[in-house]
Image: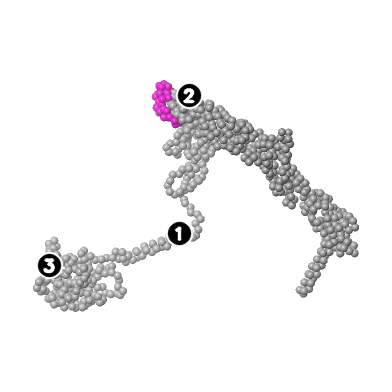
């Protein structure tokens, strides 16, 4: 089955190939132009070969296809026996594929084809401009080519035309393909004469020419900033300038346009003054009608002509500062005098017509009757004392040249007149300005004007007072120049013919906005970041964007630590005695104790528990043992030896009823130990009238301590030289009166003194 399909495919392919070969050798197609102007007619001819297998011995006809669609029959015709033609009246498509086909009946076979392109002439070059570089003296012209066609090459030609001394100069420059500018060399143009320039674009379908520029090359030049060489104040209110062009253009000697820009330095007159000139380089420039004694900063710029649309101003030169000649200050000063008894406060500021005409001004306040200078200062206020008969004071300004005329300041002592209404309104205008409104002046008195004064409440030390004078017909004003976000105290005073009214005082704020910086938790002084007056403040801190890992790292250790703390507290309360013994165990002190308190329970406190349960034993403290003798049994040294030293220490003698507890020792160490000494009692412990028991020295040959033990105490010796035991002294009886105790009895036995029994009620 597969072989059948393969044979079928090969048959179809071979058949198609045969038809292509037959068709390719059947006809020749021809058109006068493969690229035509869009909208123009197009003719195509197709010549059928005599040996064409598609037509030999067959009845055929020729058909045309345009972009794979059969052309109308009225567009085709037969030129000769085997030549056929096609005419398209107007070709609009940019790319058109025309094919010739041989048809037998309804079966048509393409025998040849051709592609025809419809294109347009080049667009007109736009925005032609030219500029002169005075340094290199090259004249650069450039233009916008418009929408170019990539498959059609467009060439440009630059034309420059001028008339010089009745001689026509014409130059033509062919521009390389792809470039849209050209540098015209210096010899091809005059510098100061008018020239005409245009550009022509050409392709196979036509050409287009730009508009013609008519200009003087020099007026297209952009000059370097000029240089101000010097300034002289040669007359009152005038400055005289010497100047030159930049170094690369100083060869020019023609007249050009200039502008001087003057601005006062550190002065109230900040309005710029621009003065135009048309001068040749190195000429003098004189500017007058300036303020006297004022520092001016001056810059300069130049261009070829102020009337030419092609000329451009240069950059401004570096500034130069010069001062005009000084003269006496002119104009008046605005004043505000406040009098309280004999204390006077005078404030002043320049009025609109005041001119300092100099610098380093100082002010003098004086009275004429009596003739007295009250103060001389460079500040804008002065405080002084006035006597009662002074009705006017005079203020004058002085600079290095001279003094101004006096400004007369009347002294108003009557200050109890009517006030304006205190229902004033405050309307913030901006961050540095606020509008104040007032009204309700008394009708019984003639108001001549108002004084509005203000000062900042946040400045330390107190801010200087500012004021303004207003006409009586004004009931509102805008205060400007305020510091942003600061509260101001504002007072409005009405002025009368013979006095000053009671002020209306209020607090004003400019426009505020939200704080730009959040308050921190530590205490500090807030300043400009408040952007206004803080009226309410939150002390809440919100932590956001904490992820789970950070919370686990913080919470888990905190919980573990808290659990351990609770466990330790409960353990301490539950095992109070054990904790107490671990921290501060009880250690008996023989020097501060008595035998009756050396019980088994007390002495075992602080000792580690035994592994096995054992009977409480008597602990030998300081290697002493106690022995109670029967009343009938005589005291003999042999008894001591046999019954005390030699008998097993864990035996229990029933005859000794005074002992409440049998002494036992299970360890080998305890069996081998030997008491250091024995205290014998010949009567019951409760019997205070019996004689004190004797004290004898041990006659054991076992060494008490190692020979090399430096801490071994010296043995107690209280034996007669004859060594008889019967001669051993006994403890003397205690006196009946404790106050009569004989200290000498204890001096021989300092260690036994600690065994003194003072209370035996519980033994």
In the picture of the structure, the residue carrying the numbered disc 3 is 733
User: Of callouts 2 and 1, which one flags the residue occurring earlier in the amino acid sequence?
Assistant: 2
Residue 612 pos. (x, y %): 30, 75
- Kindly state the secondary structure of the residue where label 3 is placed: loop
- Kindly state the secondary structure of the residue where label 2 is placed: loop
Nearest the eye: 197 or 385: 197
In the picture of the structure, the residue carrying the numbered disc 1 is 554
Nearest the eye: 300 or 738: 300
Q: Farthest top residue?
A: 369
Is residue 750 at least partly visible in the picture?
yes
- Image quarter of the C terminus: bottom left
Nearest the eye: 155 or 101: 155
User: Of callouts 1 and 3, which one flags the residue occurring earlier in the amino acid sequence?
Assistant: 1
In the picture of the structure, the residue carrying the numbered disc 2 is 405
Q: Residue at x 48, y 42 (%)?
A: 528
Residue 575 pos. (x, y %): 33, 66
The answer to whether 100 appears left or right of 522 in the picture is right
Q: Residue at x 45, y 39 (%)?
A: 458
């Amino acid at each position: 089955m597969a072989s059948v399909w393969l044979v079928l495919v090969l048959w179809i392919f071979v058949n198609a190939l045969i038809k292509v070969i037959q068709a390719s050798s059947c006809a020749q197609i021809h058109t006068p132009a493969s690229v035509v102007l869009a909208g123009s007619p197009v003719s195509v001819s197709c010549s059928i070969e005599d040996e064409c297998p598609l037509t030999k011995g067959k009845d055929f006809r020729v058909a045309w296809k345009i972009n794979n669609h059969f052309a109308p029959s009225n567009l085709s015709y037969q030129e000769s026996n085997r030549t056929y033609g096609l005419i398209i009246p107007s070709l609009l498509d940019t790319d058109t594929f025309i094919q010739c086909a041989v048809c037998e009946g309804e079966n048509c076979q393409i025998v040849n084809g051709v592609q025809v392109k419809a294109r347009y002439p080049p667009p007109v070059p736009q925005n032609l401009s030219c500029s002169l570089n005075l340094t290199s003296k090259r004249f650069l012209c450039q233009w916008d080519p418009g929408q170019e066609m990539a498959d059609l090459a467009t060439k440009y030609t630059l034309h420059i035309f001028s008339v010089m001394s009745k001689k026509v100069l014409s130059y033509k420059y062919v521009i390389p393909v792809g470039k849209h500018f050209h540098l015209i060399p210096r010899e091809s143009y005059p510098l100061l004469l008018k020239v005409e320039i245009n550009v022509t674009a050409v392709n196979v379908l036509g050409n287009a020419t730009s508009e013609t520029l008519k200009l003087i090359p020099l007026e297209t030049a952009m000059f370097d900033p000029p240089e101000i060489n010097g300034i002289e104040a040669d007359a009152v209110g005038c400055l005289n300038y010497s100047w030159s062009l930049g170094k690369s253009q100083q060869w020019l000697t023609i007249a050009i346009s200039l502008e001087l820009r003057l601005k006062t330095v550190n002065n109230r007159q900040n309005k710029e003054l621009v003065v135009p000139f048309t001068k040749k380089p190195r000429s003098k420039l004189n500017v007058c009608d300036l303020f006297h004694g004022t520092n001016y900063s001056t810059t300069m710029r130049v261009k070829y002509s102020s009337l030419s649309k092609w000329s451009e101003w240069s950059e401004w030169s570096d500034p130069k500062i010069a001062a005009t000649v000084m003269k006496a200050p002119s104009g008046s000063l605005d004043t505000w005098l406040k009098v309280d008894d004999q204390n006077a406060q005078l404030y002043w500021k320049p009025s609109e017509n005041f001119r300092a005409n100099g610098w380093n001004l100082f002010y003098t306040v004086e009275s004429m009757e009596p003739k007295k200078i009250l103060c001389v200062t460079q500040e804008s206020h002065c405080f002084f004392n006035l006597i009662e008969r002074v009705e006017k004071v005079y203020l004058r300004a002085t600079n290095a040249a001279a003094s101004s005329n006096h400004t007369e300041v009347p002294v108003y002592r009557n200050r109890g007149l009517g006030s304006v209404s205190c229902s004033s309104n405050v309307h913030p205008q901006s961050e540095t300005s606020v509008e104040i409104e007032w009204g309700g002046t008394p009708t019984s008195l003639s108001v001549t004007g108002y004084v509005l004064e203000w000062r900042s409440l946040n400045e330390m030390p107190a801010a200087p007072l500012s004021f303004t004078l207003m006409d009586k017909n004004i009931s509102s004003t805008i205060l400007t120049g305020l510091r942003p976000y600061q509260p101001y105290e504002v007072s409005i005073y009405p002025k009368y013919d013979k006095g000053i009214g009671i002020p209306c005082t209020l607090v004003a704020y400019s426009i505020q906005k939200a704080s730009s910086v959040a308050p921190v938790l530590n205490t500090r002084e807030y300043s400009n970041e408040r952007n206004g007056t803080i009226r309410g403040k939150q002390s809440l801190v919100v932590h956001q964007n904490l992820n789970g890992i950070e919370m686990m790292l913080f919470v888990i250790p905190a919980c573990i630590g808290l659990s351990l703390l609770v466990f330790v507290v409960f353990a301490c309360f539950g095992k109070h005695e054990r904790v107490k013994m671990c921290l501060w165990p009880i250690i008996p002190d023989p020097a501060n104790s008595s035998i009756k308190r050396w019980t088994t329970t007390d002495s075992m406190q602080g000792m580690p528990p035994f592994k096995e349960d054992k009977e409480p034993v008597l602990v030998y403290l300081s290697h002493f043992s106690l022995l109670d003798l029967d009343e009938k049994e005589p005291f003999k040294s042999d008894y001591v030896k046999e019954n005390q030293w030699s008998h097993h220490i864990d035996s229990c003698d029933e005859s000794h009823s005074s002992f409440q507890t049998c002494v036992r020792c299970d360890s080998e160490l305890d069996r081998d130990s030997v008491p250091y000494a024995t205290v014998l009692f010949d009567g019951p412990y409760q019997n205070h009238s019996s004689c004190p028991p004797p004290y004898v020295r041990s006659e054991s040959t076992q060494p008490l301590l190692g020979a090399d033990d430096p801490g071994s105490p010296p043995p107690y010796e209280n034996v007669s030289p004859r060594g008889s035991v019967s001669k051993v002294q006994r403890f003397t009886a205690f006196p009946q009166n404790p106050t009569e105790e004989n200290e000498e009895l204890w001096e021989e036995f300092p260690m036994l003194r600690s065994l003194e029994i003072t209370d035996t009620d519980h033994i």
